């Protein structure tokens, strides 16, 4: 796979950011800057050979295995990212060796510029890849905050730290599309079988704990539902 290149920066304007914020009584900061400090861009990746890299979600009433993605921060000296020489014009030079190493180990590193299908994006979010950015400011530090397309900023008043809401439904559709489109290899049947067994053990662990009975009942119900979905997916894949 080609080494991913970062999309051309397109700063989210205050007007566009404001359109994502639902009205509320508390005052919103002028310019709709996120209440967080600047951070580094990142690539999303997954190791599809590990059962811990998968979960099963329900999409349109069916159990669907989707990858559990992690962020590879693109900061010099972190995750094998190099410090570029003065005058270097291609930012991917800093991380291309690490991407090659990861893909050589069977990991999937996702291209942040590859456009996401429209039905896999939250309502009101512009077309594009998974890596987005918006102006931010906190504790005297201002700049750009890099975030994922499904990470919707909630209205935040002066003095508060930024709060978020994740659109899990469209993100799950996108993760399923990653597998369907071949960007992430589908999990082998034995991986799903192992995952289902692990989730079954998780239910037993919760049942054996000493905790508030109402809390336990809720946790058992949630864990049982996840285990059942995984078991169905493993049966289909077998």
Image (tube, rainbow, N blue to C red):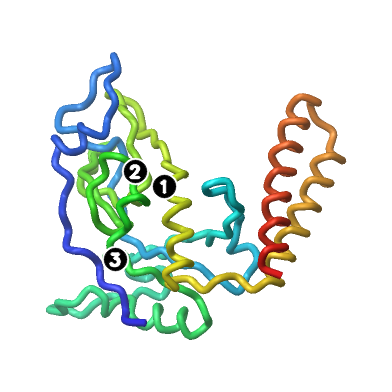
Residue projecting furthest to the top: 25
Q: Report x, y in % for residue 158.
A: 27, 24
- Reading the image, the residue beneath label 1 is 170
Residue projecting furthest to the right: 208
Q: How many marks?
A: 3
Q: Report x, y in % for residue 120.
A: 37, 51
Decide which of tag 1 and tag 3 comes sooner along the chain.
Answer: 3
Relative to 146, is 109 on the left or the right? right
Q: Nearer the viewer, residue 64 or 196?
A: 64
User: Tag on residue 32?
Assistant: none
Q: Residues within 10 Å of mark 1 (few under 14, many from 20)?
A: many
Q: Residues within 10 Å of mark 2 (few under 14, many from 20)?
A: some
Q: Report x, y in % for residue 156.
A: 31, 27
Q: Residue at x 24, y 41 (%)?
A: 136
- Reading the image, the residue beneath label 3 is 114
Tags 2 and 3 touching, CB below 8 Å: no
Q: Nearer the viewer, residue 34 or 121?
A: 121
Tags 2 and 1 touching, CB below 8 Å: yes
Q: Report x, y in % for residue 201.
A: 81, 53
In the rendered view, tell whether residue 144 sits above or below residue 50: above
Q: CA distance from mark 2 to mark 1?
A: 6 Å
Q: CA distance from mark 1 to mark 3?
A: 16 Å
User: Tag on residue 122?
Assistant: 2
Relative to 109, is 15 on the left or the right? left
In the rendered view, tell whether residue 227 sits above or below residue 106: above
Q: CA distance from mark 2 to mark 3?
A: 17 Å
Q: Quadrant of residue 88?
A: bottom left
Q: Residues within 10 Å of mark 3 (few under 14, many from 20)?
A: some
SS at circle 2: loop
Q: Residue at x 84, y 39 (%)?
A: 207
């Amino acid at each position: 796979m080609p080494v991913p290149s970062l999309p051309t920066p397109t700063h989210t304007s205050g007007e566009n950011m404001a359109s994502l914020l639902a009205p509320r009584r508390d005052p919103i900061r002028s310019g709709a800057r996120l209440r967080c400090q600047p951070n580094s861009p990142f690539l999303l990746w997954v190791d599809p050979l590990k059962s811990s890299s998968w979960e099963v979600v329900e999409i349109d009433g069916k159990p669907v295995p989707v990858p559990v993605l992690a962020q590879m921060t693109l900061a010099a000296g972190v995750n094998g990212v190099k410090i570029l020489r003065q005058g270097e014009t291609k930012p991917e030079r800093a991380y291309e060796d690490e991407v090659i190493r990861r893909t050589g180990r069977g990991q999937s590193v996702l291209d942040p510029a590859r456009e996401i299908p429209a039905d896999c994006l939250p309502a009101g979010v512009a077309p594009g890849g998974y890596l987005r950015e918006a102006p931010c400011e906190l504790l005297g530090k201002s700049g750009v905050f890099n975030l994922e397309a499904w990470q919707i900023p909630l209205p935040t008043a002066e003095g508060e730290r930024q709060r978020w809401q994740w659109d899990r439904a469209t993100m799950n559709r996108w993760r399923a599309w990653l597998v369907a489109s071949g960007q992430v290899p589908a999990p082998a049947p034995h991986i799903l079988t192992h995952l289902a067994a692990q989730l079954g053990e998780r239910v037993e662990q919760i049942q054996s704990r000493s905790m508030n009975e109402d809390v336990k009942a809720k946790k058992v119900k949630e864990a049982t539902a996840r285990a059942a979905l995984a078991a169905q997916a493993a049966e289909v894949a077998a």
